[in-house]
Each structure stands twice: as structure tokens, then as C-alpha cells.
Image (cartoon, rainbow, N blue to C red):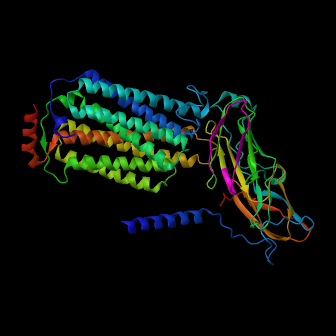
Amino acid sequence: MGSDLNIPRISFNPRLHGFAVFSACLTLILISAGALVTSNDAGLSIPDWPLAYNSLLPPFIGGIRYEFTHRVIAACEVAISLIFAVWLWRAEPRKKVQNFGWIAVGVVCAQAVLGGMTVIFRQPVLVSVAHATLAQLFFCTVVSLAFFTSRWWWQDVSTMEDIGAPRVRTLALATAVATLLQLVLGAEFRHKGLGIVPHLIGAAVVAGMIFWTAGALRRRFPTSPALTRCRIVLHSLIGTQLLLGGGAWWSRIATQTAPQPMPVMVTLTVAHVVVGALTLAGTVAVALVTNRLLRHEREAAVSTSSAQEAI
Amino acid sequence: MRIRYSAYVLVAAGLAFALVSCGKSPETGQPAGGGGSAPAAGQAVDAATAGSVTGTIKLDGAAPAMKNINMSAEAYCMSQHATPVKDESVVTGPGGTLSNVVVYIQEDMSKYSFAAPTDPAKFDQKGCQYHPHVLGMMAGQTLQVTNSDTTTHNIHPVPKDNRDWNQSQPPGAAPIMEVFARPENAIPVKCNVHPWMKSYLFVFKNPYFSVTGADGKFSIANLPPGTYTIVAWQEQFGTTTQQVTIGAKESKSVNLSFNAASSGD
């Protein structure tokens, strides 16, 4: 987003920020609803799309409850994203943030189309995985918007020089990318595109990246409250996620001969998916925070002058 | 530019040919009759010399305890059963006889012509369960799916070699009539509304198959004389085979068993 997003301006709009946070929370609920659909094998319980059983209100029974709830929340999310984009367009002075709002609308619409395609084409792995991946990217977009509209983003902050190598900013970005790829591998496993091994390797890589990033933050910036919060968030999320991942895998094996999806498997899998989304959001947040707070030696002069120019 | 275009056309044609070639079903089975000159394709089986194979399928060892199905996701389904319904992965009768086992011959019988039955293969949804649990039919035969329940189901077969489909069937809806064009074993059928509803369809090129009932018995009739591999498939234990030679007008008995300790292929 460049310097445009880093410029402290005159007005923090708490309502706009509140709406962004609400949208992010709704997206997390939407991801949970999607995980419930997949875990309960209810993805094709409604064979048609965009209508459901050729109507707006299908019978609310069995697997249809999960799929229809998912569709209703998704429709709300599309509407909320549109409202948010229009609001940003009218009230937000930063052009790039305005554009980000429209990008969110585009992503959520594409996501709805992919959701329809999973139904119409009866869950081809590629489409199902794309649907799961785009959900995570949309969540990242909304979380980023919540950051850009936050009071903290509007405030003046003093930057710190990062003299280590590799740069924490680079590490944080690489961690976010690795986490996204790991979520793709998880989606591949859930939709039976790949086995568990790539996802397990991905878990080790992401855990390693997170520990590396958090370790670099602890060693290089031990007194920064914001960066301390970043590493606490990263450690908490990866610890929880690894435990949930182990639990979800165990429950899948323990209930594989059950005649239907069992509550323990569904609960642990959904929790694993949701904390996975939170982990990605956490790594994106850390990438944004470090991008704002840390500068490399040679960037110092440039960033100061560009901020002054913009003001 | 023209050379490049021609190259593209050639490559595309090659790929299309490869795809078409790969799409054909393999025809590698042993000829029935145990050798001799191959009759012309499409001849009818001589009823005057045809024999039959009958037998019983059993489970050796104690049958695994089947888990209860939890139908609480829909009150209607619960109300249809006075006692909890058991999973039907392994259903045994007196003396260890096994139900829902598909018995068929492995050999390629394409030198004979077999018309698909005009009567449909019937598949019903009742008490939020599929009846039968395992169904055999011929390629080209119509599958008739009915809903005897007063709740909505969706019928979703997941074939690999045939066109897949997913249709809803509300209470009182007309039967769904579908045809599977290609032979295919163990096509899972599921209802995504009621995730415990599972079934298997077998689609054969010929009529030499049978599905065991509660007594574990099967019968395959009108077989031309020859040596055959009898295959028995059970959803949890996989397959077991036995060879049998049928003479002219001969009836043979073949009993097959699965080991309860094994968990399938």
C-alpha cells in the first residue's frame, strides 16, 4: 500500500472502523459456517444455486441447515462489503483504502460465484479448494481494512530501525505467504485433493517461520509494546492451531468407521479451520505492523521525506 | 506462422487421440469357455448348454458390532424407527451369512450380446435409509429412485467412469429415472441432507451378477460353459475370489467367505 497508508491524517472515523471490525467478525463466522458445511458433508445437500430447492426458503432439515445458513451469511457479507465500499468511497480520504474496499467487493463476489460453481459442478476439488482459499484471502482483505481504518493507523508512530538480517518485515511477509499456502494444503486435504503429509510438512514450515519471526521480534525489539503484542499473538495462535490440528487429525482417525460425521470430529475440524484463518489474519496483521513500524537503514531518509510531502 | 499453427493442430489432435484412447474401457479379461475359437461378437448365449453357479457367502469369525446411527438431525427420521438403526456396513444372518455382498464373474463376456433389462432397477428411500443398501444393475438399464419418506432427500451418486449427478427428491415427487452408460463397480451413493444414508451401486456389462440377501445366498444363471473367476465384494472386507469351471448344463455350488479380522483390500 506504500506511503499513502502510513500517513497520519486528520480524521479517525470510529464508525467506519467499527463497521470494518464487524465485517471481519462476520467473515470469520462465514468461514466457520463453511467449515461446518464441509465437515458435515453437507455441501451438496442443496443441489441447485443460486436458488435452494428452486425457492428462497428450502426445508430447514439435516445438512440443508448448514448449507443454507452458509449461503445466507454469505449473502449478508456481500451486502456488507458493498455498503462498506460505498462508505469508504464517500468518507475515506485515502484513495488506496477506497480501492481496497472495492477489491473486497470483487473478491467476495468472486467467492460467491465459486461457491455456486462447487454446487453446480458437484464439488470438483480445484473449485472447492479455490473457494476455501479465496475465503481466506477475503478475510485478510477485511482484516487489513480494519487495520487501515483503525485509530492506531491514523496516529503518528515513531519508527524503529531494523538492523538485523533478514529484515523482520521480509520475515513477516514470508510467514503470511507460507501460512496462506498451508491453508491451501489444508483445504486440499479436507476436499480429498491431497493426503495429510503435505499439510503436516506445511505445519512444520509455518511453525518454524512463526517462531523465527517472533524470535527476531523478541531479540531485536524487546521493549516495543506493539511488537511484543505481535509475537504474543503469533505464539498464541500457532500453539493453539498445532493443538487443534493434532486433535482434528486424531478425531478423524478415531471416527473413520462411524456411519456419519461425529460431533467431536466436526467441532475440532471447524475450530482448526477458524484458528487457521485467525493465524493467517495474525500473520498479515504482523506484516502490516512491522511494515509500518520498522525501517531499514537506507529507507530512513526516504520515509521521512515522503511523509512530510504527503502532509 | 503456418508451420506453428500446423504444429498446434497436430499436437491437439494427438492429445485428443490419447484422451479418447485412455477413455476406453480395458478389455483384458480371459475369454469365457476356457479357450477355443472366439465366437463372433454379439452372439446370444446358447440356453441349451448354459449352466449356473449358486452359493452362500459367509463371514468367518465374529461380526463386528455395528454402530448406531444418530438420526437426531431430523425429527422425522427419528420418528420412523422405534429403536436405534444400525449401520449396514456388515449385516450377518444365522450362521454368519453375509447380506449385501455383490457376486459377479470377472471374465470379459463382450463376445456375447446382452440386452439391458427393460424393467428398471429400483432404489427406494424409506425411514431415511436406502433400500436396498447395495444394488446391482446393467449398463443401459434404468435406475428408478423413489422417495417413500415424507421428508426431502437428495440422491448423489459419485461415480468415476459415469456421469455424476445430484438431484433432490421432495416427498411425493415423481421417481427419478437415470441411466448409467458404463460398467462401474461400487459407485457410492449418498444423501447430503442425511449424512448417514450411504449405499453402493454396481453397473455391469452383463447379467452375471447377484446381490446376497439375509440368507447370504447368490445365484448366477444362464452362464455359457467355461472357466470363470467368481468375485465377491463386500463394502468393509473388500473382495474375495474363487475359480469355477462350468460344463454344459452344469450347476455348480461355490461358497465363499470373508475373514472378520480383515478390513478389506
> Which quadrant is the N terminus of chain B positioned in?
bottom left
Q: Nearer the viewer, residue A240 or A261?
A: A261
Left or right side of A29 for B169: right
Q: Nearer the viewer, residue B223 or A187?
A: B223
Does the magenta-highlighted stretch encompass residue B178?
yes
Left or right side of B175 for A37: left
Does the magenta-highlighted stretch encompass residue B232?
no
**Snapshot quadrant of residue A271:** top left
* Residue at the image point whose x is 30% and y is 24% from the top: A18
Q: Position of residue A310 (x, y in %)?
A: 11, 33
Does B255 appear above or below A286? below
Q: Position of residue A172 (x, y in %)?
A: 25, 46
* Residue at the image point whose x is 60% and y is 31% from the top: A53
- The single residue placed furthest to the front in the displayed view is B2
Q: Nearer the viewer, residue A221 or A49?
A: A49
Residue A13 appears in view: yes
- The single residue placed furthest to the top in the displayed view is A15
Does A77 appear above or below A289? above
Left or right side of A74 for B108: right
Which residues are drawn in magenta?
Answer: B163-187
Does B149 appear above or below B89? above
Does B249 appear above or below A19? below
**Snapshot quadrant of residue B257:** bottom right
Q: Position of residue B88 (x, y in %)?
A: 72, 45
* Residue at the image point whose x is 30% and y is 42% from the top: A283
Residue A147 appears in view: no
Q: Position of residue A7 (x, y in %)?
A: 15, 33
Left or right side of A269 for B37: right
